[in-house]
Image (tube, helix red, strand yellow):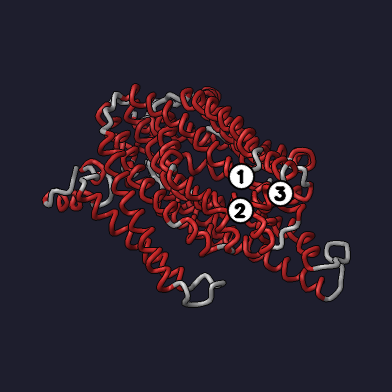
Amino acid sequence: MAEEKSGVKSQSLLSGAFILVVATILVKVIGALFKIPLSMLIGEVGRGYFSTAYEIYTPLYSISMAGLPVAVSRLVAKERSLGHFRDVRMIRRVSARLFLMMGILGTVLLMLVAYPYTKFIVKYVENVYCVLAIAPSIFFCCCMSTYRGYYEGMQNMLPTAVSEVIEVVGKLIVGLGASYALLKSQLARFEAGQPVFGAIRETKEDALAAIYPYAATTAVLGVTSGTVLGLIYLVIRHKIKGDGITKAQLLSSPKPANGQTLAKIIVMTALPIAASSLVTNITNLIDAATIQARLKYAVEKAPDVIYSLYGAEFEEMKVADSQIVKYIYGIYNEVLDFKNLVPTITMTLGISAIPVLSAAWANHQRHSIKVAVESVIRVTMLISLPTGFGLAAVSYSLLDMFYPAATASIGSTILAVYGCTIFIFAVSSPITSMLQGLGRTDIPLKSLVVGAVIKIVLNFILIGNPHININGAPIASIACYLVVVIINMYSIIKITEVKINFASVFIKPCICSAISAFVAFLTNLVFGKFLGSLGDPDSMINGNTVALIIAVIAAVIAYVITILLFKGISKDDLLMIPKGEKIAETLEKRGFLG
């Protein structure tokens, strides 16, 4: 078997995914410890600056390296399964040169477009500092991805997982610490009557408006620092532990393809994936620009309508007229932090599936392909449906726990809409990754183009309507990804000839999730009435927080009980996780497996 040939103990699909899930949860928890205090520190306006830097950084980062990690992972898995270990090593060397070149080009390109983008597209030139601060991270991320793609192809997800955690810890310590220090020092200057960034500020609000772009910039520098630390870890790990391929295995391998040939194969494999990523990220860039532009249009067209909807919140948060668009857009991005939690976790299933499916496809193992596809889709639904419905059920209480009541009031509806449909976003990435692992990289590209057009058109129509405004953004996103999922799901079923049991994969988890969400809503409502008056309402730890925690625990218990009673878990799924045989044996004896 390929695993035995390589000398590296491979992780199974769900075992590898489990490692990435744990890392992703840690990353998200630490990320929350970064973003939530950051929002409290620099406010929604500061978050608007911070988010704008990410919006231009993400597509250019994707242009720099899109498709390469997936291509490397897929090719390494394929050659390794065939025992071509010298090709495996050559792929790593060739990909390292490609990543280095793309990292340099991406960083330079971002620095060049920083000013024109912030000046003429976003029309907030103060964002330029954040964009320049994040630019070097493209280079370091590209270098990291050389190692991540290689180890993922070897079916070893641990290096990726550890580097991700190190990266986010660096972001937390450096970014939050630097932002806090700058804000504190500049406010001290204001209170002492000294100039704040070159000018005397009349009011504290004026001082904060001047400080926010720079405070956001120091937070962004934390992002770049994290990428440096993650790369250092991967370089040291590779030098100490290597990849597990022995000299004997290299000697017994056939002569590898030359570097130019492999580079051509990597690039040709990566191009359709890169095009898909490019479409996604350019769409996101246009999405960010159109959301803000159309929101600005709605505010200017009918300010009385906007004030009738959000006037109390503006007054509570003392939002200046010139900052309304940034304020609402900042809240939208805060909601996205919660909405993106589940898809980020389920994305790991697709990452783990790529080498498994690539190896199975290369060796014509049809049964392994079917098991992998069915398991990924089923597990994605088992995770995304209950968490999404749960987010919808407690959307206001959840936002109110971390942010001011005004933020929760505006954002809760958006979060509830995303929560009810989060399974669409959650399954999109794994399906795309599986198609890439099977060599059908063209299909996700086509579906994304169709979805992107729908999203941009709906953004323009819905957000520009003052009565709908920012609430049109989630509707457009849902429509986009629904189209993508339908096209990709149909394609993967046709290619793999998998007969998906929709009752087991979707209907059972959906019913169980609805029950658990109702339990969460009712428990939060009841305990909130009894405990809501306890503690400081402005503190994160109070009676409402306790009620929310009790509601979450009750919902988890309800979901576990109902999913077992409905036999929503498959034996094949359990066999692919650590100690799954014992768990499967125990549940099977009690009649709980589907």
527, 589: nearer the viewer: 527
Q: CA distance from mark 1 to mark 2?
A: 10 Å
User: Label 2: how many residues lie within 10 Å, few (<14), some (14-19) or many (20+)?
Assistant: many
Task: Give the vertical position of 159 relative to 548 (above or below).
Answer: above
Whichever of callouts 1 and 3 sits on the residue coming sooner in the sequence is 3
Label 2 secondary element:
helix
> Which callout, 2 or 3, points to the residue nearer the camera?
3
Q: Which residue is mark 3?
A: 304
Quarter placement of the N terminus: top left
Q: Which residue is mark 2?
A: 331
- Give the residue type that dot 3 points to: Asp
Q: Position of residue 314 (x, y in %)?
A: 68, 58
- Give the residue type that dot 2 points to: Ile
Q: CA distance from mark 2 to mark 3?
A: 20 Å
Label 3 secondary element:
helix
Contact (Cβ within 8 Å) of mark 1 with mark 2: yes
> Which residue: 64% across, 66% down?
177
For residue 320, what is the image quadrant?
A: bottom right
236, 46: nearer the viewer: 46
Q: Position of residue 408 (x, y in %)?
A: 55, 58
For residue 191, what is the image quadrant?
A: bottom right
